[in-house]
Image: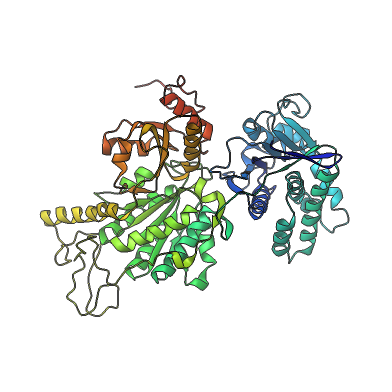
Amino acid sequence: MTTETQIKPEHIVEELDRVTIRFAGDSGDGMQLTGTQFTKTAAVFGNDLATLPDFPAEIRAPTGSLPGVSGFQLSFSGSDIHTPGDRPDVLVAMNPAALKTNIGDLRPGGLLIVDENEFEPTNLKKAAYVSNPLEDGSLSAYQLVPIDISRQNELALEGLPLNAKDKFRSRNFYALGLILWLYGRSMDTTVKWATEQFSRRPDILDANLRALKSGYNFGETTELFRVQYRVPPAVVPAGTYRHISGNEATALGCVAASVLSGLPLFYGSYPITPASDILHELSKLKAFGVKTFQAEDEIAAIGAAIGAAYGGHLALTGTSGPGLALKSEALNLAVMTELPLVVIDVQRAGPSTGMPTKTEQSDLLQAMFGRNGDSYVAILAPATPSDCFLMAIEAFRIALKYMVPVILLSDGYVGNGSEPWRIPDVSTLPKIPWSYAKEGEEYSPYSRDPKTLARSWAVPGQKGLEHRIGGLEKSGQTGDISYDPRNHHEMTLARKGRVDRIASDIPDLEVQGPSTGDILVLGWGGTYGAITSAAENARKNGLSVASAHLRYLNPFPGNLEKVLRSYKHVLIPELNTGQLSLLVRGRFVIDAVPFNKISGQPFKIAEIEGKIDEVLGRSGPYVFEFPQSSGLSGG
């Protein structure tokens, strides 16, 4: 708390720098919508923010069951933040199952708002409660505020020509209105959205707006809350901002690459969680020359994209989890034919179908080595939701310049998460150069640019440039099929050399913190926020800790080894069993310390802080919730 002012006899306003809220309920309770609307309101107000949606894997689990709980966490602040928060300050639980699965994360003393109407025997049994937690004292560590949200919402909607089920579905707007009041936020953003969204259903619009205003007014008039809270706007660089998710930013980045290159964009994809939103977004942009193709399977999707690349288009395919494995053979064809193709992999927890709606970073080694033969592709990884925009553009720049497939490794945390995005000045974005082979010149499909080793790009229909490409090895001189041992050796090295030479065309790895010191915390992908925050906190406590984040994973930035050798210890937190650690150790023979979490959930800042203390000898072995080995005995 920084200030207190009296605004009316029964309410005090307390100013906070940061608040983390989690909405949780059944998958049909509209928690994603509720969280998104509060997020948009906070963004319009000017807060910095970060979000973490948490979806159930089942399409529709039984109502009130533990597997069916859906959650949405957001953190908003008056200063710069990097994560959606470790532990929520506020938990809004719409039923017993939501309480059961989320209460362990609420900080001690945190505010707990529940819909007490839902805590009846049937729902308590579904959530495996033997007694009512609202009555048995088990929630004494929290500020429990039970509200009969369902009943209050029903009263607010009296007289509307809706059945009981439709009225019940509006209670998430009641909860949203209450939380908007509690944190001094206007209803205007949500009213505008709802008016546009439900314009064709005036009865539903009326119900949602009534529920929203009733929840807001309940907060204003009830004696349950003696304090309102204010989080001031963040000080940010001037510009136009919008709220954006990683998948939205990826889609816009791909369209921007189309505009910057002047090539039409083709996207071939098979729907798969959590990458499907990219297909949804791109399918809306036909006016920008975007062609989207929903294929019958993953193999057809990448096959169509390879065909688009052969035809001279900007070629893109996207997937997640097992979809990358299914695409591997065709991706190897793109490697062999040396065509510019971008593959987006929004990683999820595996193996196999695994946990489709949970995040992980376990596809790095598959992206590096998951194809037969010595098969080299470029690999990039965005660090934040907004970073997806620029890295999508960069993926296409590299693909076109080096005539090489590029894998863009996003993940569920980055793809589904959101943050404010400063919309760039389009005039400042550099054009993406490329060229087709020139007609009228003697043509060989594998004649190479001496600087990049990229072959020339001839497309069907160019006069005199008929040629043959395919999966069989070709002569580097004539383009004919070749089984010559020396030719295969040289062509393999040429394909590798294209990727190696990218290292001179990408920025050096940037370090936050001291350029030399006791420990460097190195990460990639969605671990950026937790790593950056933990290292910043360590420096505030007087520790010699730096952090760095890899956006280029193949090839690595040219200065990576120098950076690694500038610190006594290198700590690598990853949402896998240590894949980047393996690559760093193997490439540079550096005893990097892996720190691994494979729970489907992102790192907490406190977890990385604890591991930093352990590595620096400031504490005993860090007691991590998730063991670093199985603990199982066996041969």
Of residues 540 and 285, the one nearer the viewer is: 540
Left or right position of 86 against 193 = left
Residue at the (41%, 61%) spot, across then down: 316
Residue at 65 percent of width and 46 percent of height: 27
Q: Where is residue 108 in the image (x, y as percent from the top left)?
A: 66, 28
Residue 7, given in percent of the width and then of the height, sits at 82, 44
In the rendered image, the vertical position of residue 243 relative to residue 220, given as above or below: below
At 39% from the left and 69% from the top, the residue drawn is 261
Q: Position of residue 435 (x, y in %)?
A: 30, 71
| Position of residue 23 in the picture relative to residue 395 (left or right) | right
Can residue 536 be seen from the camera position used here?
yes
The quarter in which the N terminus is drawn is top right
Q: In the shown orientation, is residue 594 left or right of residue 96?
A: left
Q: In which quarter of the image is the C terminus?
A: top left
Examine the rendered structure and indicate whether residue 629 appears above or below residue 98.
above
Please give the name of the residue rendered at 29% of the width and 51% of the height, measured from the top-left corner: 503
Residue 569 image offset from top left, x and y in percent: 36, 30
Rendering quarter of residue 331:
bottom left
Q: In this orientation, which residue lies closer to the viewer: 22 or 277?
A: 22
Along the line of sight, the residue nearer the viewer: 481 or 8: 8
Rendered position, 32 above or below 572: below
Q: Which of 383 and 214 is in front in this view?
A: 383
Colour theme: rainbow
